Amino acid sequence: MTPLRGLLLAAFLLFVPHAGQAGTYVDSPYFADRVKAGKLPPVAERLPENPRLTNVAAMGRQPGRHGGDLRMLIGRAKDVRLMMVYGYARLVTYDSDYKIVPDILEKVSVEAGRKFTLTLRKGHRWSDGRPFTSEDFRYWWEDVANNKDLSPAGPPQSLRIKGELPKVSFPDERTIIYEWSRPNPFFLPALAGTAPLFIYRPAHYLKRFHARYADADELAARVKKARARNWASLHNRLDNQYKFDNPDLPTLQPWVNRTRPPSARYIGERNPYFHRVDENGLQLPYIDRLVLTQVSPALIPVQAGGGGVDLQAAGLGFPTYPFLKGNEDRVGYKVRLWRTSRGAHEALFPNLNVSDPAWRRLFRDVRFRRALSLGIDRTLINESIYFGLALEGNNGVLPDSPLYDPALFRKWAVYDPDRANALLDEMGLRERDGAGIRLMADGRPLEIIVETAGEDTEQSDILELIGETWREIGIKLYIKPIQRTVFRNRIFSGLSQMAIWSGLENGLPTPDASPAELAPTSQLGLQWPKWGQYYETGGKAGEPPDLPEAKELLALYERWIVSTGNEERRDIWERMLAIHADRQFTIGIIAGVRQPVLISNRLRNVPEEGVYNWDPGALFGIYRVDTFWIDE
């Protein structure tokens, strides 16, 4: 993966060339009636003076034409947010080489890695036609992020460097400046993220729900009508650009959600003020509407394989590939296998913060975690479920990463039940019950409940196979599928013993990529949620780490933040990866599993090969879904 170069140089400038002269742009016929009736201005008046030019041919694709619906399936109502994910319009974005480039912004100037000057495109507008200016950034910073009613914890943690918040200023309507006293290597990647840091809001829309701006009586009436607790609760409910579930909230994405939940079908309509154009002057996106139909997650492979979708990956695990492939010619689609880049397709997360004292002692003993890993027959899982095509090893970095070490990838991650049994015996877990299950010190059988989000059978199939080989070392495994929200809350509260989930988000890092996932920096670290919460809240919640290796990981991460040299950053990464492989804080099972991507024969410009990854990548977003088009 290409490193994010230049963030710490004395200064640099990211820019996008001018797209063309006003009047040369081509509108979609979708808006013809509205333009003719005077309900919409002509396209040349709707675009910024300097739109973002996308040279589709230079991307190795075919310039398209306007029109059509892009049909997809979702398994939950909240997946309407995929309109925002796939649309992938951000202040700055990753390109297909994982370099950060301006998108919504016209340019970004960075000085010494600590001062960021953001320049907006002149004439850029929200989806409702209102101007997009620095006032939208000021409103978020002063009236949302620093308002105690709306943001009790203050501005996001990602804007704090060693506890220091930035100085933020707004010199004119097109300029925003963020400045710290030391380098901030996280700022631009946060803006480019799949679930990005939104440092702006549609102020003209939200002010009517803000106590500082709205008439008190009118605001009280709105709160009462919405049955909200107070004005702040109503404001936060309506202000969620990531959830994408409020059709009234103006957006900068290529499609605007026009469906209010709950619904079985969500329609995303093209944004008449979207800021991108192709080399022929066509305003993007090419496709007029996204149509997301909600079905049971278990039915997604069947319905996708039966036709009626144009692009589908969500809900299609690798085990569905033979079925989907068999229907290609009959139904009229192609199935491609894209690479994935997570550190592990599936991994086990022993909860080091579990509330039960006996289980906490067990999980914090490295011999126990190593024994669990040695008791997994990864080859059996690979051949039984993935036709032997996956990688067997730890939750770490993959072979395409410059940080990959094959010895670390396999450390403690080979099937060796004799060694696993010896480690468990060494811990004093020698007593067994009549079924051959080892007994804990308090006499309870050594029965591990592994919780899953319960959204497909793949994890359960893996756990069944692990359960077979764990019995050989005297451990009983139970599978507990639960709803995703409950799943996370049980882990956070310490009720869950162990979870199965995907591994490191970025399995193809360079030394310039943040190693935050390797240290207890976030509550979302399922192996140490309370340690992560402690870090995120500055010690106001959670628990401080009390294992020496976890403390060392945090210290190494803090060193990486202030480091400017590539070699030093590489050394930090290598040390952190070595600690993880040796201490088995997470237990990797399988990596490098291919993702089936179903593409209808009428859909154009979807790459033959790709990397299907959440962040960086935004799943399909990095490949610019706004340049996909329907060929009828």
Image (cartoon, rainbow, N blue to C red):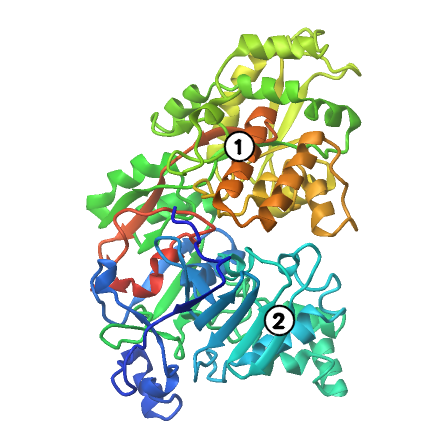
Who's the residue at 48% across and 59% down the image?
9
Of callouts 1 and 2, which one flags the residue occurring earlier in the amino acid sequence?
2
Q: Are marks 1 and 2 in contact (CB under 8 Å)?
A: no
Q: Position of residue 56 (x, y in %)?
A: 25, 65
Residue situated furthest front in the rendering: 10
Say which of 125 and 291 sits in front: 125
Q: Where is residue 361, by image quadrant?
A: top right
The label shown at residue 150 is none
Looking at the image, residue 402 sits to the left or right of residue 370; the answer is left
How many numbered markers are drawn?
A: 2
Q: Where is residue 24, by image quadrant?
A: bottom left
Mark yes or no: residue 309 visible: no
Going by the numbered disc 1, the residue's amino acid type is Ala
Say which of 63 and 300 sits in front: 63
> What residue did someone put label 1 on?
347
Q: Position of residue 148 (x, y in %)?
A: 76, 69
Who's the residue at 30% across and 77% down the image?
19
Mark yes or no: residue 364 visible: yes
> What residue did someone put label 2 on?
238
| 148 shown above or below 480 | below
Going by the numbered disc 2, the residue's amino acid type is Leu
Q: Position of residue 540 (x, y in %)?
A: 79, 51
Q: Specify few, some or many for label 2: CA neighbours under 10 Å numbering under 14, 14-19, or 20 or more.
A: some
Q: Position of residue 325 (x, y in %)?
A: 26, 39
Say which of 451 and 492 sits in front: 492
Question: Which secondary structure lies at badge 1?
Answer: strand
Inter-mark Cα distance, 1 to 2: 36 Å
Question: Which secondary structure lies at badge 2?
Answer: helix
Who's the residue at 74% across and 28% down the image?
360
Who's the residue at 26% across and 77% down the image?
281
